[in-house]
Image (cartoon, grey):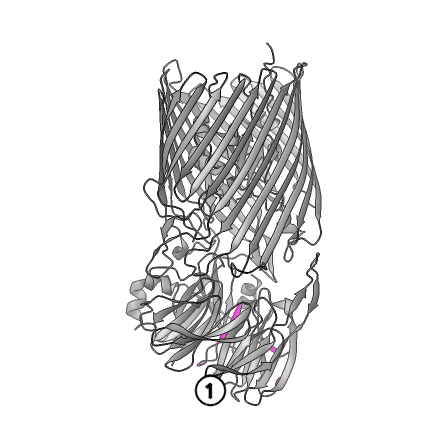
Amino acid sequence: MIGEVTVLETNARYFCEDKAFFRVDRLPLSFNANNSLGDILVYQTPAMVRQYGPAGFLTSISIRGTGTNHTQVNWNGFAINSPTTGQADLSLIPAGFMQQVDVINGASGTSFGSGTFGGTVNMVNKPDWENRFSAEYTADAGSFGTISSRVKVQAGNHRWQYHASFLYQHADNDFPYADRYKYGSPVTRRQHNAFDAAGLMQSFFLNLKDGSMLEAGSWYQQKVLEVPALMGNYTASNALQKDSAFKIFLAYRKQFGKSGLMVRTAWFTDDLRYTDKISSEDDVYLIDSKIGARQLRNEAEYRYTLSEKITLGAGADYNSLNGISSNYNTRIHEDELAFSAFMKLNLGKWTGNLGLRKEFLEGTDPGLLYSFGWRYKASEQLVFRTNLSNKFRKPSFNEKYWEPGGNPDLRPEMGWGIDAGAEGRLYSGSGPSSIRYSVGGFFQRIDNWIQWVIQDSLTPVEYKTVHAKGIETELVYQYKTEHVQFSSALIYNLNRSVIVHTYDDNALYEGKQLMYTPLHSGKMSNYVKWKGWMAGLNLHASGKRESVDSNDESLRLPGYFIADAMTGYEKKFKSFSIVTGFRIENLLNAQYEIIRAYPMPGRAYYITVSARFDKHHTNY
Amino acid sequence: MKIKKIFLTLAPVAMFLVACGEEESKNELSGYRYGVFILNEGSYLSNNGSVSYFNPDSATLVNNLFETINGRPLGDVVQSMGFAGDKAYIVVNGSGKVEIVDRETFETETEPILASYPRYFLAVDSQKGYLTSGNMQGYVYVIDLENDRIRDSIQVGFGPENMVKLGNYIYVANSGGWGLDSTLSIIDTGNDRVAGTLAVGDVPSDMALDNDNDLWVYCKGYAMYSSNPPYDLISETPSRLVEINPVTHTILWEGIVGSAGDYAGTLPKLAVGSDGAVLFFLRPDGVYRIDAGNPSLPGERVLEGSFYGLEVNPLTGDLYVFQSSFTGNGTMFIVDPVTGDSESFTVGIGPSGAVFNLK
């Protein structure tokens, strides 16, 4: 078999069957190519996405009611969260750049390192070895001055594959909304809200003669965003934020007889510049804040099949991080080292996973990380899984070194968590229908949750202990024949994430639900493909959310219900196809805020046209 | 916070928590003409500033009064409130507006007055009021109280804050805004012109008149940072209390109370006692008192704790101090400075001060 190499999985993905796992379907991933990853995750996974506005705005992910720096976002095995804030801005990640995305809720610290209390989002570029040459151009235009343009090129054979995606986006975002904070609730258009973004991702895969694989990738992303004023403000905003990031990596995988080796190295640079002026005519900036990070990340993994029943794994990580900012006293440099070990026991119906990890960080020690879990397959219809593991988050550069106020003595946030669930497939026989379900409960404790407070100055402290607990359920129905594909997925979450106590024993906060974490939330995504036609309907419902730690009733945000609908047609010629699509976002014109005082757009219309040339037809 | 434990040893604490409700407020009290209004700044850039209403006779508290009556949130950084005739003027610094409400019903009937970075409002007479505004070059806007519109502007110093009226003159504290200023502007209310300036300490932030009509100014001091990395603190000038005779413009007394860097978690607030003979002022570790007639520092600490604001009830002489965490509701403590008896109330987010309407 020429070049048919099983792409070796990372240890993190190999030793994780005991966790709650959500895979994003390929179909929506390619349809919403010009949207950001946040738009897709909100409908396909239990995650909640926090946005300050429509496309282009800071979009952060919150899983299980945890913080926005409690979910690690990975690209080909590398964590891309910013070392300065600990967050990953999903608006900088075009969904269509990735071939595979999945979410692991409550991912363990042993497999991923820092910042996984909520979970991980794992994005992977994968080669399509069947591809010879394909080129695709997609143009998208719609309401509020939105346009985007994407070019995708793939070339290769069974030996090598090259893949490039380029995306340009612009939106004025001047949508009308009723400003309920102003006298008379006037309907106005959102001002100073535009954004421009461009990104280029390239991947290269090479199968070497000895069966090993070399992979290289690069990703450049840039965004300029006008930051608007709050609702109710009469003063115009002149704030501007520019983000630019460049990432490049190299990876090597080799499968020996009983073992496999993966080594990878990456260089990441991130820069953010935030400016503000008193008036738009001014030359001088009132605020000009620059923050940059440079990282060198290296990982090596080894896996060894000891016997039919036992597989062992080991990993070593070495990262060299630098932070540069006018707000830091000096240029920050930190090294990180970690060693991990894993074991999988395959006992027929039972599979057990055990993991241990030790991190060596400068000036702080999160202790030994462990993960212990089981998966029991009673039948195809019923599979149980349970996992006990601890997680931690290393304090970010801003928390430690920001002048004034940064606290270099902060200890890491820590906590253990337990996950248990059942899942299975019904009707997964030879017929066209299949039903898949999953139901699980979780409990995660987070100690030393760091938050900025006013003491002698604004400073981050080990502020509170949180218990995040809840239930996650998913039901997926799929129907597939030669001409028709239909899928409907329903997710419901119950999330009771509360402050147990604060460092100053503030009784006003005890037992209170965390900010922006609804108790109830549900999503549904439906797709149908029939001959050349496709249609989709996505629904998202959220219960009411608190906007302050003390759960003041007057500051609560009401629940909301959003529906997005889309339809499209693919016309195929020999090697060529054209897809035209039309979608309506926020079909019901809901007036809502995800973050208090930042309005989200009402109903919006978009058309997409995509032309694809394929030398060798693939199942895209 | 530590203050809670200190309070428990100091005096019995009574907790009153009254949920706000329209029925309660409208029936129990005959409108909002008489009472105390607590200004809750909000947590900045979150539009959660508010005004709380408190009746000290019945100890009834109504939080979030503006939104309860008018059905919409007040806005971002509620800075101050002033009264003129039948109306109250609420200055919402972050949202760039001054909301005008009826003093009895607390309803708004007109559009707010718009201004860039407005801070304090003071009624001059029945026809006009002054509004300080600006975080660099500052202005005092002359507001026509008949139609509630700005009709003129007077250029003053940088970052004008609150104002004090004595006879036909208004004294404006120029706190420097985002720069530096160390003057008071004196405005002749007859012709709306600057009649003079007084030099005081750096960053004059709060003022009050004592029973001799001498003007006390709390000057925060100025912290200067290098414009090159690593942006070290180059200099820090001292914080002062300055006593001035406002008519003769002479400085009668001044004393150093600390330095500019002390005021991140505490505001440089002062208040005159109800008899006008003592002066209370805030420091990061509590409330201090000096004799207005015969001042000497460091003064006597009458209340220990870390507070964000200080007021004195002009009728009873009680101290009203505020604790703000900005991530959730704050607390107001009412303390008798003689006996130490105190009560605490949960108010809005970031309470920084109060205005008293007890006549």
The chain containing the residue under callout 1 comes to B
Q: Which residue is mark 1?
A: B168
x%, y% of residue A381?
A: 42, 21
Q: Nearer the viewer, residue B55 or B138?
A: B138
Q: Residue furthest top?
A: A1
**Image-based side of A351 in relation to A177, left or right:** right
Q: Please, what secondary structure does the residue beneath circle 1 have? A: loop
- For the question of whether residue A57 can be seen, the reply is no
Q: Residue at x 38, y 72 (%)?
A: B149
How many numbered circles are shown? Answer: 1
x%, y% of residue A137?
A: 48, 29
Q: In the rendered view, would you say A273 is above or below A22? A: below
Q: Nearer the viewer, residue B110 or A543?
A: B110
x%, y% of residue A15?
A: 58, 26
Q: Is residue B100 magenta?
A: no
Q: Quadrant of residue A551?
A: bottom left
**Image-based side of A505 in relation to A343, left or right:** left
- For the question of whether residue A271 can be seen, the reply is yes
**Image-based side of A66 in relation to B254, left or right:** left
Residue type at mark 1: give it: Asn
Q: In the rendered view, would you say A198 is above or below B156? A: above
Q: Is residue B297 magenta?
A: yes
Quarter of the N terminus of chain B within the rendering: bottom right
Q: Within 10 Å of the Cα at label 1, are there few (<14), some (14-19), or many (20+) other Cα atoms? A: few
x%, y% of residue B275?
A: 49, 85
Give the residues in magenta: B295-316
Quarter of the C terminus of chain B within the rendering: bottom left
**Image-based side of B35 in relation to B304, left or right:** left
Q: Residue at x 71, y 49 (%)?
A: A331
Q: In the rendered view, would you say B21 is above or below B279? A: above
